[in-house]
Amino acid sequence: MKILSVVGARPNFVKIAPILRALDRIRPNLSKPLMSLLVHTEQHYDDEMSAAFFQDLRIPTPNHTLGVGSGTHATQTGEIMRRFEPVLFEERPDLILVVGDVNSTAACALTAAKLCIPVAHVEAGLRSFDRTMPEEINRIVTDALSELLFTTEESGNVNLRREGHPPEHIHFVGNVMVDSLHWCRDLAARSTILERLRLPSREAGGYALVTLHRPSNVDTPQTLARVLDALGQVAREVPVVFPAHPRTRARIAEFGLNRYVAEFDPAAGPQANGRLTLLSPVGYVDFFRLMEAARLVLTDSGGIQEETTCLGIPCLTMRDNTERPVTLTAGTSTLVGNDAERILSSARAALAAPMPPAHAPPLWDGHAAERIAAVLVERG
Ligand code: UD1
Ligand code: UDP
């Protein structure tokens, strides 16, 4: 059996690492040979968005790299398909495995489905019901084409059943992001990032951690200015560290919004001076440590809503909706949109409240990848 897994962008690396490990672990117990291959589309290509994750998460070197890079949606999606198809001709896998909701996920699912190669989708069924989100289109397309649908939470099961997927295609396995979180805990404990950034402990007042990269927040000058202004006000109460996605860093410069941010100054350390302390994107292990020790996280990331839930860190999600409702109902996340007043008042309330407990929604137990591997092998 030949399984070809696909990654392309930062969150994909976090999701694939435990699955590749689980396939490796199950291999010696099988009667038939199992070959596991990895393709990296290189949708993300900067070292800090890609190579750092291979290193931190011990992901093996990909068997194929596609060098796709950035582009408009159609350019990037089309280019991934064009470059992925010859890999499928060459490798003739029995199944491809895609994760998440990025352009690489949907493009590779479509390429394989057209060649009648079965597709397995990890993190299936999530829906924000907001088709202005590029990821929502990718989720719908990928699920429609997938024969194996691995879900992380009950809402995913409900959505897939409503869309008419046969129950035998839906496998509720839990969350592979949480597998990575468990795997990384000891490594993160050895990270020195808090010391390197001179960040105050919670007892000394703590700090807030921000990430921001959704087009709806960062691609229009007025919205980005409004969000940065609100975060700047939070940064008067506590130091705010902001490992900025390259898209966001570029928009801040392009829209002339540098007044809201200050590059990290090792001599001074982060200050509660009304400006966000701008960092480059941080590797997975260091980012884990930054989340775990934060007083508060403000983000529009999908994965970080889940990770803060498991770590017991309050998370203000700067979006109007989420495809991960369990993080609201059984987690630490609150939707605050991109309204300045709401961001600031919610941040003040969170900073004044005790830290929430850690949550583990059903099957977020560190063993999701093992369940996925078992289903894949069983299918044969
Ligand atoms: C993509 C995903 C999004 C995911 C995010 C994770 C899609 C449609 N979006 O968004 O779902 O949450 O990744 O981080 O697939 N860039 C660099 N270096 C890189 C990568 C990107 O400079 O290594 C810059 C380029 O200017 C590029 C821009 O970031 O145009 C956006 O990259 P892209 O992959 O198109 O989308 P993301 O915003 O990263
Ligand atoms: N992450 C990281 N360093 C950063 C920002 C995020 O390691 O500077 C990790 C984060 O812990 C999570 C993943 O990247 O595991 C989420 O990726 P991102 O927010 O880019 O994508 P999304 O989840 O929104 O699709």
Image (tube, grey):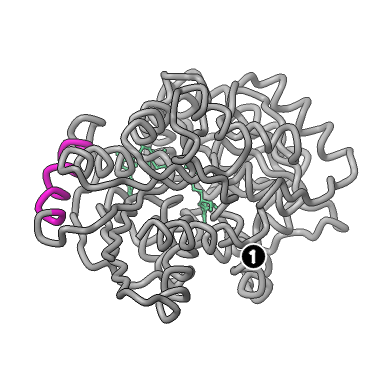
Say left or right for 269 vs 101: right
For label 1, the SS is helix
At x 78%, y 25%, the residue is 345
Left or right of 194? Residue 30 is left
Q: Position of residue 349 (x, y in %)?
A: 84, 32
Q: Is residue 332 above or below residue 60?
A: above
Q: Position of residue 341 (x, y in %)?
A: 71, 19
Query: Closer to the camera, 79 or 315?
Result: 79
User: 183 and 375: which one is in front?
Assistant: 375
Residue 216: x percent and y percent?
A: 46, 24
Which of the 4 quarters of the picture holds residue 289? bottom right
Q: Which residues are magenta?
A: 76-88
Q: How many numbered marks have been drawn onto this rendered protein structure?
A: 1
Disc 1 marks which residue? 182
**Relative vertical location of residue 195 with respect to residue 65 in this rendering, above or below:** below
User: Could you tell me which residue is drawn at 46 percent across and 73 percent down?
Assistant: 26
**Would you say 10 lies left or right of 127 here?**
left
Q: Residues within 10 Å of mark 1 (few under 14, many from 20)?
A: some
- Left or right of 212 on screen, residue 60: left
At horizontal 59% and vertical 63% (from top left) the residue drawn is 266
Q: Which quadrant would the N terminus be assigned to in this image?
A: bottom left
- Position of the C terminus by quadrant: bottom left
Examine the residues drawn in magenta and state their main secondary structure: helix
